[in-house]
Amino acid sequence: MKRVITFGTFDVFHVGHVNILERAAALGEYLIVGVSSDELNFSKKQRYPIYSEQDRVKIISSLKFVDTVFIEESLEKKKEYIQAYDADVLVMGDDWAGRFDWVGDICKVIYLPRTPSVSTTEIIEIVKAI
Ligand code: C2G
């Protein structure tokens, strides 16, 4: 059984998130998702997510093509997570292309094209302008 792992913040959940999770799930039989902690998001983007990590975990856990969800505390712990969850494939969107090639010695790494024209940042800007 091929086990796929992917990571993300998945804040203000949108169709681009659904698409990547669905495509990641289709690459194997079991999908594991690491949801970035609020603190990790702050360190990456200098702001806290709109939705708390508990709520983001609840949303991702409710999806029918997701099997296991955990909180990702650090980008540098990728290999530990891959080993702990026994993943065969790491999937990320191509905005991360090349950035996780360093785990390629323990699992396959695949970057999938992002869904165009939808992003959390853009949604926040649109809502702010209303
Ligand atoms: N994504 C996508 N299409 C979009 C928006 C996002 O395919 N229009 C994908 C991203 O490429 C990523 C996943 O959805 O693979 C989650 O995106 P984010 O929530 O923006 O995740 P990010 O903050 O980049 O965190 O360890 C890696 C990080 O935790 C990724």
Image (spheres, rainbow, N blue to C red):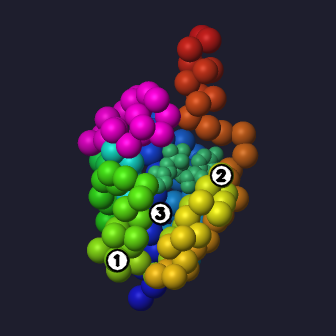
Magenta stretch: includes residue 104: no
Label 2–label 1 contact, CB within 8 A: no
Quick one: 15 or 88, which is closer to the camera?
88
Q: Residues within 10 Å of mark 3 (few under 14, many from 20)?
A: many
Give SS at disc 2. Answer: helix
74 above or below 82? above
Q: Residues within 10 Å of mark 2 (few under 14, many from 20)?
A: few
Q: CA distance from mark 2 to mark 3?
A: 13 Å
- Of mark 2 and mark 3, the one earlier in the sequence is 3
Looking at the image, which residue is at 35% across and 68% down?
A: 81
Eye-nearest disc, 2 or 3? 2
Give SS at disc 3. Answer: strand
Secondary structure mostly seen in magenta is helix
Label 2–label 3 contact, CB within 8 A: no
Give SS at disc 1. Answer: helix
Give the magenta-colored segment's residue range.
38-55
Q: Residues within 10 Å of mark 1 (few under 14, many from 20)?
A: few
Eye-nearest disc, 3 or 1? 1
- At label 3, the amino acid type is Thr
Instruction: Please give left or right for residue 95 compared with residue 25 in the image.
Output: right
- At label 1, the amino acid type is Gln
Instruction: Please give left or right for residue 101 compared with residue 82 in the image.
Output: right
- At label 2, the amino acid type is Asp
Looking at the image, which residue is at 56% across and 18% down?
A: 127
Q: Is residue 115 visible?
A: yes
Looking at the image, which residue is at 51% across and 82% down?
A: 105
Q: CA distance from mark 3 to mark 1?
A: 13 Å
Q: Is mark 2 within 8 Å of ligand 1?
A: yes
Give the number of the disc on residue 83: 1
Give the number of the disc on residue 6: 3
Q: Which residue is mark 2?
A: 95
Residue 73 in the image: state x and y as whole percent: 32, 51
